[in-house]
Amino acid sequence: MAEARKSAAGNFLREATGLVRQVTFFDAFLLNLFWLNIGLGIGITFSFAPAAFPGSNIIVGVAIATVFSMINVAMYGLLSGAIPRSGGEYVAVSRILHPAIGFAASWAVVWSNAFIIVLGTFLFVADGISPALTSIGLLLGNDAILNAAFAVFNPVTQFLIGAGAILFFGILLAAGTRNFFTVQKIFFILGSIAVVLAIILFATSSNPAFIQALEAVEGEGVYAATIQTARDAGFAVGSPSFTALVGAIAVALFTMPWGFATVAIGGEVREAHRTQPLAMMLAVAVTGVVIIIAGLAITSVVGRDFLGATGYLFNIGDFDNLPLGAPYFNFFASVLTRNPIIIVLIAAGFISWTFMWIPINILTGSRMIFAWAFDRVVPERLADVSDRTHTPVLAISLITGAALVFWAIWTFTGAYFLTSFIMMGFFGVFVTSIGAMLFPYRSKAMYEASPIGGYKVLGLPLITVLAAINALFFGAMAVFSATNADYGANTPAAWITFAAVYVTGFIVFFVSKALRRSQDQIDLELLYREIPPE
């Protein structure tokens, strides 16, 4: 883009971001839907929850998570509608609470983005490609295809497949956002077909039919033997309890609350004050309803004890005694049919769901990096926008490169910090909720001039009411994740990761602030009194 220019106030990098408002309502809805990710949501919820929290009412847990997630995204939608700029909650929180708090929270989000790209890449291989090859290999009785399904877990093969996927989406996003949204629609069609077919297969089957189909593939008695093996290894069926229910809610929150991806591209969404809250809330509602329907179907056919047993064996790494190699929703559905077209469509659809976590986190992370650079906190070149594609190419390249490094670490060392970043996510939502709750009071003029300035409930600002509920709920979930060993987020490694990311975020901000003042005579405090230009 043209050489950086100061704004009239002399604070921002230039007078316009260079980003273009080209994201439609449907684009925004799909982006949020894929960040929630119905396919992965079904798989994670109904494999991990029965294993980690046996006795929990998972359906009720998902329903409660859906209600509070609706409140969460309504709050994010109103906040983004009031301050419609690219950069996620960073732009709002840094203006409402304090620049350092906004930057540190956003810094943690971007690290989470980079890691979740890696998680999506792994799931693309483990929950997409491998089950697809296994299903097709079993159908055809082809040992070569079955061997290929396991060969993808060879570290070098896995790294090359994953690195190719990350690079593909990094290049696609750098080439123009419209190109990505076209690809997104194609994957949505494939993913929707797969979920519908899987639900139909479960809805028209039964537990005895599933056992018969499974044992036709894996051998007689494998269903009961799997449950017994898991029990011998430490799996307990458990009984209903409040703690187990909270655990089920926490597992559902692996996916349910994150339907606000478009906050990161607020400066590129058309009619943001209307589009943002509606697109987010619709995405959460659709996801919650589909996961509940699918959960009822899979639980009645596969059986709760078998789901818990396979999830438990998977979590402890006992793959030798795990039927089909993995406890995946799409895997179990494919066992119920011998139709090659249906098997291939389910396989392709679930590859689509797993695939899409990669580009969405590249997109959202890159816009936060862009916003930091536009505010002059990090090197200004990271805010460069291509005149041809209207994308921040260097910011996209940076998070793509970081994801490749994380992917190599995951693949070749087995380092695993997922729960660190989930806990970090809960805490980030809590911080944003505090900012949104105080928005009408700490930034009164900005709030009253915004499109949401007149939204009231019982005489109080609507965003304050929603944010107060949100802060209580996600504050409680952050405490639960930090204190419950079954959730896996309170290990020394998780705490060290959590603390290191936030501490480095504050250090980066204050060092940058000092350097800007001494070298460029720029006071970042003045900059944060304004909303960035469009």
Image: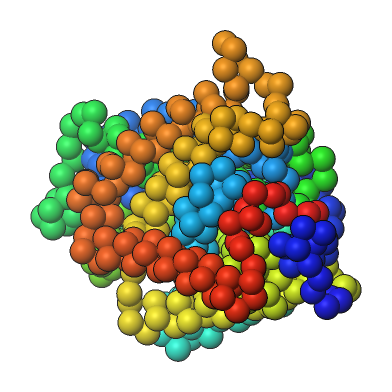
As rendered, which of 387 and 104 lies closer to the eye? 104
Quadrant in which the C terminus is drawn: bottom right
| Camera sees residue 277 | no
Above or below, 36 against 180 in this view is above
* Residue sitting farthest toward the top: 458
Residue at 71% over, 62% down? 11
The image position of residue 369, as x and y in percent, is 61, 67
User: Quadrant of residue 181 in the image?
Assistant: bottom right
How many marks on residues?
0
* Residue sitting farthest toward the bottom: 156
The image position of residue 132, as x and y in percent, is 53, 66
Residue at 19% over, 40% down? 237
Q: Relative to 233, is 98 on the left or the right?
A: right
The image position of residue 401, as x and y in percent, is 57, 80
Residue at 73% over, 54% down? 532
Q: Relative to 129, is 230 on the left or the right?
A: left
Quadrant in which the N terminus is drawn: bottom right
| Camera sees residue 523 | yes
Q: Relative to 104, is 266 on the left or the right?
A: right
The image position of residue 464, as x and y in percent, is 54, 27
As rendered, which of 521 and 109 lies closer to the eye? 521
**What colouring style does the render use?**
rainbow
User: Quadrant of residue 25 in the image?
Assistant: top right
Above or below, 397 against 473 in this view is below
Residue at 52% over, 40% down? 435
